[in-house]
Image: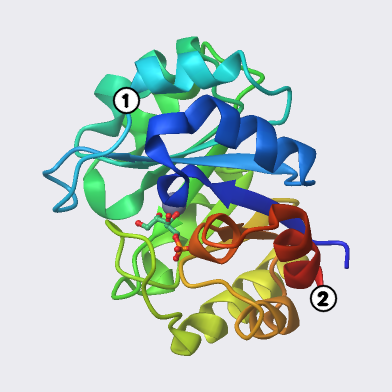
Amino acid sequence: MSSTIAASLLAAKLSELGSEVEAADKAGSDWMHLDIMDGHFVPNLSFGPATVQALRGRTRKPLDVHLMISEPARYLSRFAEAGADRISWHIESEDRPASVLAAFKPYKKIKKGLAIKPATPLRRILGLLEKIDLALVMTVEPGFGGQKFMQEMMPKISALKALRKERGLKFLIEVDGGIDVHSAPLALDAGVDVMVAGTSIFAKANYKNAIQALRG
Ligand code: DX5
Ligand code: ZN
């Protein structure tokens, strides 16, 4: 019940993105999730900073930007200036995490997220948990909406929850990919705080009911 829902605009009607954001806002989505793809880190292309900036004017809800791009440190300021409230980058996209963390420095108010692909073991991010506000656990291969939820990622979520407690940290745990009425309870049981949902909201006629149904 207390989980945050982030509507993933990738599944929205792209020719009407502005009104889709307004509709998702009105329907009760807590955050707006924007998937940024560069055709290099993932085999697909999507939005850029100009889209983030354009949508910033259509809602007051937090813009949750998910970078699926190479060289995140190079582009981070563009998304920060465009009005992102949270920016997550992929651990697999950068060999020098310190360079990305440094890029966040001028933007004190922006929450720092760190995303992890399904095949990447949790140990890759264990040394960074003290430095982030959000851990984004992918439950599909990044790049496309509408894929099947990978239940086998749930141990990553429970392990993160346990580590957070052990170390006295406060980062949020977000799950992304294949969230619907069947998978949401599994993710909630594992301990997520935030659920990204694209298809299970935007493919429905009534977004409010769809969001309500995910909350359980
Ligand atoms: C996938 C994206 C997801 C995607 C989720 O690369 O990161 O945010 O839009 O879409 P659904 O909810 O349809 O799996
Ligand atoms: Zn995403």
Q: Residue 138 in the image: state x and y as whole percent.
A: 43, 66
Q: Which corner quadrant holds the N terminus?
A: bottom right
Picture quarter containing residue 188? Answer: bottom right
**Residue, disc 1:** 48
For badge 1, the amino acid type reads Gly
Badges 1 and 2: C-beta atoms under 8 Å apart? no
Confirm if mark 1 falls within 8 A of ligand 2. Answer: no
User: Is the residue 185 above or below the residue 55 in the image?
Assistant: below
Residue 14 location (% of width, % of height): 39, 37
Q: Which residue is drawn at 73% across and 22% down?
A: 60
Q: Which is nearer the N-term, disc 1 or disc 2? A: 1
- Identify whether 142 is placed above or below 8: below
Side (left or right) of 216 relative to 115: right
Q: Is residue 106 above or below residue 60?
A: above
Residue 198 visible in rendering: yes
The reply, left or right, for residue 191 in relation to residue 150 is right
Q: Which mark is residue 216?
A: 2
SS at badge 2: loop
Task: Please name whichever residue, 19 or 137, is drawn nearer the observer in this view of the structure.
Answer: 19
Going by the numbered disc 2, the residue's amino acid type is Gly
145 or 41: nearer the viewer: 145
- Residue at 49 percent of width and 62 percent of height: 199
